[in-house]
């Protein structure tokens, strides 16, 4: 009987440092769960690279079949023998530290100190109150019981692998020391079929925006992967073309099947259970779970930019556009809000912000927003902007669409696959082009409304569609994109 091994090394590394879950982790979980439902727990196993022992280990998939949704705490227990602090036991405003006991303890003591001093402003800044803090402490057990390790048998994949077994790698493994040679051995010694999902070739296409030696590492990983991969999945047609061009350069041919990602927001559980956004209760729910500094961003109209603030996102040019727009006296200009974490190679942007006082207040930041805060920002923005030099897919474009919001989008790489005919396109290399696109959506509300009407009339691709396509491809075998090799040098232009 053929066994499907799903590599979850990236999930292990993710839950080690994070308490929330991104789209790719959730879709990986859903694919595994549906494969278990379809083929049974005997035919589907999980596998991961044990860095300390330098061993590739397999565990049974039974526990996945019993889970209704991705559970960060349980996966943390599976991999590390301890779970993150349960959500129900987490103090208000400290959820981001659930998985980091020392940081959690530090910030817990800090908040307790401010509560004792009666510093209500400190708690308001974090979207909470002293009353909420004291209420939690009153109901808190003296000692929180640590989650016990899951009793799962670890077996080396090399001890149970058979010819014809299938290893599916949905996450990024290119920076994990030792795993590459392990995959090669599984292919050479046991005849295991290995499939890799490629998210993008950005380190090779725009190395000027990549930190350190990652571009070199990525190149050697991708080239070596052709030695053990039977075929590849690509998350966009553009990524498939890039991958085919790379293979031609290194003299290798492998089937590539495109399975596009979603055009929807990966709604976190607290957001999903809220009342509708337009109701009074919905507004109250959202404001309670949003930090005051994020909530205040919606006091005036704003345009939203989501993502890590790195040079590839082209944020210096976008800021220059806002500087020009702010000088137009008769234009009702929204503010520009960047939501994400600080990135790299942004000296020009940072210098501009410091020298101009964030363009006199026209630019503001929501650093490291939670899922709830991000949903709030999508709901309340005028439109979104994504003017990157290159993307593998472009999740924020689709996330904005799922909230009914159009955007200004760069007409390169995969982004037109996400935006379709529902956004305003621009040339990422031209400040004038970005300016014209932004000004059109700001000064011509009828243009914005027309695009929003198209969004409302369009069935957007969701994560359920992505999961279903992966399961179908894995079950029936790959259907290589017939046109990839022929048009691999073509680049998508705006519709």
Image (cartoon, rainbow, N blue to C red):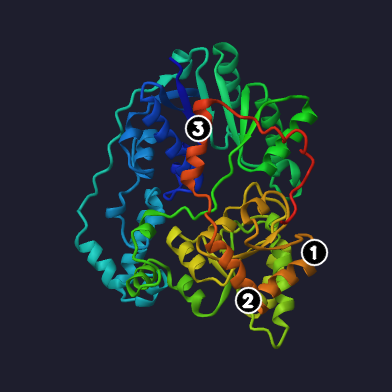
Quadrant of the drawing holding the N terminus: top left
- The mark that comes first in sequence, 2 or 3, is 2
Looking at the image, do the residues carrying marks 2 and 3 touch, with CB atoms under 8 Å apart? no
Q: Residues within 10 Å of mark 3 (few under 14, many from 20)?
A: few
- Kindly state the secondary structure of the residue where label 1 is placed: loop
Q: Residue at x 52, y 24 (%)?
A: 167
Q: Which residue is mark 3?
A: 472
- The mark that comes first in sequence, 2 or 1, is 1
Q: Is residue 17 above or below residue 246?
A: below
458 sits to left or right of 495: left
Viewer-nearest residue: 340 or 264 = 264
Q: Is residue 291 above or below residue 257?
A: below
Q: Position of residue 473 (x, y in %)?
A: 53, 31
Say which mark, if any, is on residue 446: 2
Q: Which residue is mark 1?
A: 430
- Kindly state the secondary structure of the residue where label 3 is placed: helix
């Amino acid at each position: 009987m053929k066994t499907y091994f799903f590599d979850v090394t990236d999930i292990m590394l993710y839950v080690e440092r994070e308490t929330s879950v991104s789209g790719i982790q959730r879709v990986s979980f859903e694919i595994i769960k549906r494969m278990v439902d379809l083929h049974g727990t005997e035919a589907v196993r999980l596998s991961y690279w044990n860095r300390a022992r330098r061993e590739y280990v397999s565990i049974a998939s039974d526990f996945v079949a019993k889970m209704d949704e991705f559970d960060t705490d349980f996966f943390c227990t599976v991999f590390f023998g301890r779970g993150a602090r349960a959500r129900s036991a987490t103090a208000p405003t400290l959820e981001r530290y659930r998985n980091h006991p020392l940081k959690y303890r530090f910030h817990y003591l800090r908040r307790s100190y401010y509560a004792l001093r009666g510093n209500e402003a400190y708690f308001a800044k974090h979207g909470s109150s002293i009353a909420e803090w004291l209420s939690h402490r009153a109901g808190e057990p003296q000692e929180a019981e640590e989650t016990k390790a899951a009793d799962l048998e670890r077996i080396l994949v090399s001890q149970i692998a058979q010819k014809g077994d299938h290893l599916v790698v949905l996450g990024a493994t290119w920076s994990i020391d030792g795993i590459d040679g392990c995959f090669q051995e599984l292919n050479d010694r046991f005849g295991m079929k290995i499939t890799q999902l490629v998210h993008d070739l950005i380190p090779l296409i725009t190395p000027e925006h990549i930190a350190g030696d990652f571009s070199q590492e990525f190149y050697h990983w991708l080239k070596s992967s052709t030695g053990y991969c039977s075929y590849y999945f690509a998350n966009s047609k553009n990524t498939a073309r890039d991958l085919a061009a790379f293979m031609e350069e290194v003299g290798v041919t492998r089937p590539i099947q495109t399975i596009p990602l979603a055009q929807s927001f990966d709604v976190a559980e607290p957001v999903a259970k809220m009342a509708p956004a337009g109701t009074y209760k919905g507004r109250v729910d959202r404001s309670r779970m949003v930090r005051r500094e994020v909530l205040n961003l919606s006091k005036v109209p704003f345009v939203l930019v989501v993502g890590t603030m790195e040079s590839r996102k082209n944020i210096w040019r976008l800021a220059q556009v806002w500087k020009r727009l702010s000088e137009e006296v008769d234009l009702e200009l929204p503010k520009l809000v960047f939501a994400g974490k600080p990135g790299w190679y942004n000296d020009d942007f940072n210098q501009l912000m410091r020298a101009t006082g964030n363009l006199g207040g026209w630019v503001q930041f929501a650093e490291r927003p939670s899922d709830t805060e991000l949903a709030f920002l999508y709901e309340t923005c005028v439109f979104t902007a994504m003017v990157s030099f290159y993307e593998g897919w472009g999740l924020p474009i689709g996330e904005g669409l799922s909230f009914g919001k159009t955007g200004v989008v760069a007409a390169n790489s995969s982004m037109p696959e996400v935006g379709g005919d529902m956004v305003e396109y621009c040339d990422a290399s031209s400040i004038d082009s970005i300016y014209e696109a932004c000004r059109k959506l700001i000064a011509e509300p009828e243009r914005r409304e027309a695009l929003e009407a198209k969004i409302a009339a369009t069935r957007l691709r969701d994560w359920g569609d992505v999961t279903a396509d992966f399961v179908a491809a894995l079950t029936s075998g790959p259907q290589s994109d017939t046109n990839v090799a022929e048009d691999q040098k073509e680049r998508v232009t705006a519709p």
